[in-house]
Amino acid sequence: AHELRLMYIFVTGNQRSGTTFLYQLMCAMFDVGYVNNIAAKFPESPCRGLRAATDLGLDEKRVSFRSEYGNTPLLTDPSEFGWFWRRFFDLERPMDKAALDRVAWNELRAILGAIHEDCGGKPLVFKCAAMGFQMGRVSLEIPEARFLYVVRSLNDVIQSTVNASLQRHGDAGAWYGFRPPMNPSDMRLPPAERASVQVRSTNALMESEARLVLADRCFTLSFASLCSAPFALLDRIQQRFGLRPAMVQHADS
């Protein structure tokens, strides 16, 4: 039998790499805690949000497996919890050492611990793709942190980024996604070329951060395996992190 333990699993990776889908699978298939869309309405007091969800009867694990650019439709769906993470991290770009030194690490650890208690002592799962920029420092400051790092064919990520710009803004040249360091001249490139520089730079930065994390704390997986054999992949994740299974009701059933 798997023991419940203090552990925070962060789903990370480049934009358009399947991180939202993996996050939903993790929340649905394992006995873990997570912040749903109603609880996420309380970024200044996450535990109050969790209790509000319970009081409203919205603490049930009910996952739609639908999303639009990371946003999920049901109040019971897992939330990216972006407003909370923005209190501590820049979610668009890497942070330098001075900025990371200013992060309120003690406050963050205390809040995560309180969420852990309010979720019944279960391991917690979060999707914070931008945490891929900070994996090395986060693993030092939060020893209980674990990372699921999703990688996808860079050409597919580039094309998906251009498509997302067109679909969201009606303009393939509109900016979408992370903002890694880029030369001013790169910003004037045609959309596909600019997205290529953006995506490849983001990938290189996240790869370098992943190498800073101890092997038993970071599980790297491919988008291809997530699509072709999701249950086999989940079994490997379960074994790596010692998670308990928890089948839940699908939102359409």
Image (spheres, rainbow, N blue to C red):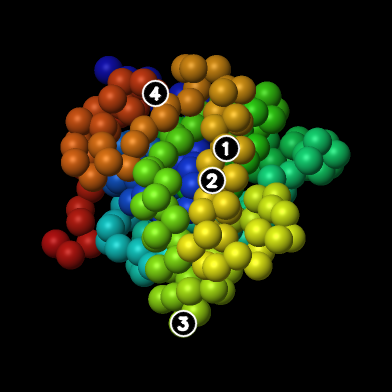
Residue 84: in sight, yes or no? no
Q: Which of the 4 quarters of the picture holds residue 161?
A: bottom left
Picture disc at residue 204? 1
State the residue position of label 4.
241
- Mark 2 vs mark 3: which is more N-terminal? 3
State the residue position of label 2.
200
- Mark 3 vs mark 1: which is more N-terminal? 3
Q: Quadrant of the C terminus?
A: bottom left
Q: Is residue 245 left or right of residue 150?
A: left
Q: How many marks?
A: 4
Q: Residues within 10 Å of mark 1 (few under 14, many from 20)?
A: few
Kind of residue sitting beneath label 1 = Ala
Viewer-closest of 241 and 117 = 241
Q: Circles 2 and 1: CB distance less than 8 Å?
A: yes
- The residues bearing labels 1 and 4 have C-alpha atoms spaced at a distance of 26 Å
SS at badge 2: helix
With respect to residue 189, does 200 lie above or below? Answer: above
Q: Is residue 163 left or right of residue 144?
A: left
- The residues bearing labels 3 and 1 have C-alpha atoms spaced at a distance of 29 Å
Kind of residue sitting beneath label 4 = Phe
With respect to residue 166, does 140 lie above or below? Answer: above
Viewer-closest of 126 and 232 = 232
Q: Position of residue 177 (x, y in %)?
A: 55, 60
State the residue position of label 3.
170
- The residues bearing labels 2 and 3 have C-alpha atoms spaced at a distance of 24 Å
What residue appears at the point 44 percent right and 34 percent down from the top-left corner? 148
